[in-house]
Image: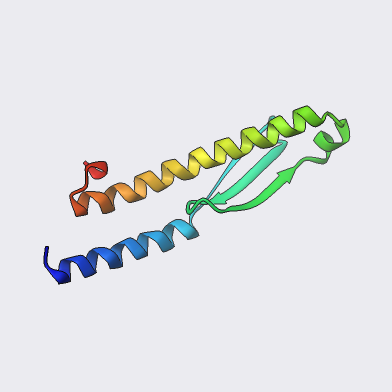
Amino acid sequence: MDMMKMMKQVSEMKKIQKQLAAKKVEFSSAAGQVTVKMSCDMKPHSVTIAPELIAAGNVKKIESAILDAFKGVLNEAQEATAKDMKSLTASLGLPFGK
């Protein structure tokens, strides 16, 4: 592989990493009472819990709703990342992109 091609691929990878950091996904659970937002570089940005859920005082339900929302948003971020990375890995000739 020539050096110029490698440099171009590294540049493209950095560009995709920046795009992933800028791309946000969100997922809600418990009928929309808990929402988690995350960037596609897998960094959580916010958690919103409806006051009614807190007021109900059911700790197990709150914990379950938060966990479900985090699992859901993580899945959304992973799917978005895989989609974006597929084009990069295809250009590199790696199996993931095929």
| Side of 49 where 68 appears, left or right | left
Q: Residue at x 22, y 49 (%)?
A: 90
- Identify the coloring: rainbow
Q: Residue at x 80, y 34 (%)?
A: 53
| Side of 55 where 72 appears, left or right | left
The tally of labels here is 0
- Would you place residue 91 above or below residue 80 in this image? below
- Would you place residue 51 above or below residue 17 in this image? above
Quadrant occupied by the N terminus:
bottom left
Pinpoint residue 56: horizontal percent, then vertical percent: 86, 31
- Would you place residue 52 above or below residue 84 in this image? above
Which of the two residues, 73 or 4, is positioned nearer the viewer here? 4
Pinpoint residue 21: horizontal percent, then vertical percent: 48, 59
**Furthest residue to the left?**
2
Pinpoint residue 39: horizontal percent, then vertical percent: 53, 53
Q: Residue at x 44, y 56 (%)?
A: 20
Pinpoint residue 32: horizontal percent, then vertical percent: 68, 35
Which of the two residues, 3 or 38, is positioned nearer the viewer here? 3
| Side of 3 where 80 appears, left or right | right
Quadrant occupied by the C terminus:
top left
| Picture quadrant where residue 45 is located | bottom right
Q: Residue at x 69, y 32 (%)?
A: 65
| Picture quadrant where residue 83 is located | top left
